[in-house]
Amino acid sequence: MTGNVQRLDPALSMRNAIWLMVAVCSILSISLAISQSKWIYLGIALLPGTIYISLSRPFVFPFGLYAFLLPFEGVLVVTDASQGPGPTITRFLGLFTILVLVAKGAVEKKLKSPDKIATWWTLFILYAFLSVVWAIQPEFVYPRLPTALGLLLVYLVVSSYQVQKNDYETIKTMALMGGFLTALIMVYQFVSSTAIASRMALSMGDVESGLNKQGFDLLIPMAIGIGKMMEDKTKLWRKGVFGLMVVVCIFAVIITGSRGNLSAVLGMVLVCIVSVKGLKNKILISGLFVLATALIIPFIPPFVIDRIQEAISSHASGRSDIWFVGWKSLEKYWFFGAGLDNFTKAYTEFIAYTPVFIGVDRASHNIFVGLLVELGLVGISIMLVAMITHYRAIRTELLQSDNDRLMLYAAFWGIIISGLSQDILWYKSFWLLWILIVMHKYVMRPQRRLHI
């Protein structure tokens, strides 16, 4: 009998005891910090677990949380709302992502050269930095540079990391769940609000997200939901769940009252119907959106219909007048541009040409017109090449699943259409699309090599 008794490894017992003590101390510290609103102490208590998760599963935290929180970004400002716009939690998560992936990739030798298509966005940002030399007002360029550099670094670091398929799927799932939860909260706030006749975005306390940006941030989650629904192995009840998520996101876009984002949704639907393979899948997607339309139409608020009807008479809320002045300013700034973030100054300089005066220092409300004025023919050419090379990567990668191709197609065209009516270049969701394309391109390479 005694010969069958297993002896415990002293080292294992000690390790388990240490972990138990750490867990107990952490729980007590967290409970005490929350009960006394000592948020600094809470951060210290969570630090060990945070470091462990970030080093073992960086695509859950911090980058997964980064993707999850993008639709919430407008209300996650870390400064007092009375002080105006300030840094958001997602900015710090982006910086943490850079540090974690660089450190982990260097130690585990998972870093590689960035994908060659990343060269074009790098050149674009470098040219934007260079525009400070000839900008109308250089002081307008300087505040934008940290944002531009941060977005580029996140993009390059993820492009340089040896991503696994489960990492790619994790990011997709986190982005989808963040968008769906945001849309769900928006719909609840809309239904329970007394001001149901007005446009609505996500709000928390005194902070409210921008209406147009809020709708834009839901486009990629919507595209991911469509892709998940079209997976061949997805059971029927799961297809229904993903379809419901997409419908909720569409309604959330509608209540923002953003005509540009609503046009983007319609464009995404058409792209999906045209791009999906197989008659059965075409019928499935068409049926989903017919059903979604039938469910949503009775609940569409009157202000949405009013905004659509007045789009022509109001010149798209003055956008066409702004674009006209922007085009006139190209007489002077067509080649090198007026400098990054200097569209407002170029507009004011040529405001005498405006058909209708709507004020000075107006933003472009169009990514292509805005960048053509700010960075000239050189800058917008680099940006267009960057977009085209990423789009070609969606089309040319071998053996990719149809649902991923459909998702990326829908997201690409949705973002392009939305960019025709708002300045989206520095939105983090805009850069998330290029990150997803590069991640997918890298994930497909092992399969591609096996079949050459």
Image (cartoon, rainbow, N blue to C red):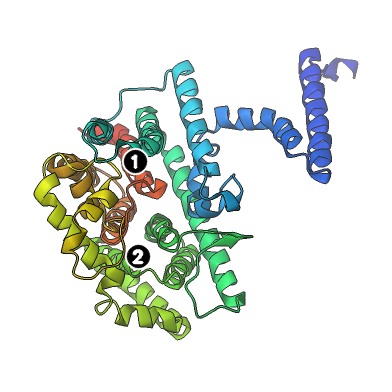
Residue 275 vertical position relative to residue 36 in the rendered view, above or below: below
Task: Determine which quarter of the picture holds residue 393.
Answer: top left
Which residue of the protein is positioned furthest toward the right in this rendering? 2
Amino acid type of the residue that numbered disc 2 sits on in the rendered structure: Asn
* Secondary structure at numbered mark 2: helix
Nearer the N terminus, badge 2 or badge 1? 1
Residue 441 vertical position relative to residue 270 in the rendered view, above or below: above
* Secondary structure at numbered mark 1: helix
| Residue 232 or residue 7, whichever sits in front | 232
| Residue 159 or residue 225, whichever sits in front | 159
Q: Is residue 255 left or right of residue 430?
A: right
Amino acid type of the residue that numbered disc 1 sits on in the rendered structure: Phe
Marks 2, 1: nearer the viewer: 1
- Residue 450 appears in the picture as rendered: no
Task: Determine which quarter of the picture holds residue 413.
Answer: bottom left
- In the rendering, at what x and y percent does residue 123 appear? 23, 32
Label 2 sits on residue: 261
- In the rendering, at what x and y percent does residue 208 appear? 54, 60
- In the rendering, at what x and y percent does residue 442 appear? 32, 34
